[in-house]
Amino acid sequence: MPLTILDQESPKDILHALIQESHRDYEAIERVYRCMGRSMKKKKTLLTVPHSEKGYASKRAARGKISFDNKKLKSVKVTYRTTPLYPNAIDPQDISVAQAEDQFIVDGETLRNYEYNTCPSSPQFILYSLHSPEDAVIWHGIGAFGASQLVKSYTTTRVSCAKKLVFKDLQEKHRITPKIPLQFNLLPKNMWAHPIHDNIDASIGCVDNLQDLAAMGMRIALLPTQKYVRELTKR
């Protein structure tokens, strides 16, 4: 999360501008939703998740509701609820949760003229990733451990920028390069896994013989861009 960058930016800099532009009006939000494969029917996906004054900031614990006044963004309702985190592969009974209970409303004007110091929030990955300059990406076991939908959101947003379907006014002003990096996938069947528990997120310190693990090697495969681009026409 680029929260340190947001904290140090001025409201005229790139990450602030992406949040401001994505909340400009109904059409702007709809375009980003389309890149994410989301429907505007329920309007529950927050493009940036405002933090609670009680200290809560977990995206997994946050629920949202976007409201409009005609085509103008009226407000965003944010609800934080205690929610389970990722499952424990070794002990499914040992459940981790994010403790969070709060509800508040952020005015639409606050997001259209966004300032992190006034309204701290965590933007969605596809927004802040546009400021990332990589020439290649290695994803983590897409199709088994990683979410294909995230790759589609990332790729579709980049393609949409290249076609100037989203954030076109920001590309020249902030020198956004809407290139589509080469994308590779660590093949799930060749990923390192704990020799006893068979989970891929084990600490390296709990593996007795790292040489045996390293000897297994890893394999990556190219992810074709067109396979991970969503249909951009209106639903």
Image (spheres, grey):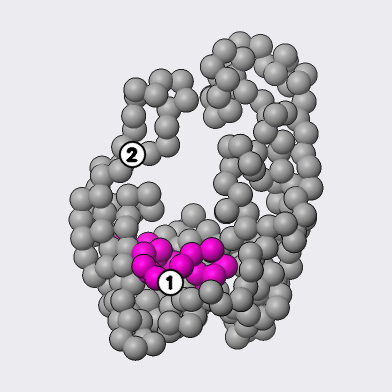
Residue 8, horizontal then vertical, whole percent = 46, 66
Highlighted range, magenta = 32-51
Specify the label residue 143 is tagged with: none
Q: Is residue 67 left or right of residue 224?
A: left
Secondary structure found at label 1: loop
Residue 92, image quadrant = top left
Above or below 54: residue 123: below
Neighbor class of circle 2 (other Cα within 10 Å; few <14, some 14-19, many 20+) is: few
Find residue 120 and report its horizontal and vertical position in percent.
35, 64
User: Dot 1 corresponds to which residue?
Assistant: 40
Observer-nearest residue: 95 or 34? Answer: 34
What's the mark number on residue 84? 2
* Viewer-closest of 108 and 52: 108
Q: Is residue 40 magenta?
A: yes
Numbered label tally: 2
Main SS, magenta region, reads loop
Amino acid bearing label 1: Met
90 lies left or right of 187: left
Indicate which disc, 2 or 1, sits on the residue closer to the N terminus: 1
Q: CA distance from mark 2 to mark 1?
A: 26 Å
Secondary structure, mark 2, is strand
The kind of residue tagged 2 is: Pro
Q: Quadrant of residue 227?
A: bottom right
Q: Where 21 falls versus 102 (above or below)?
A: below
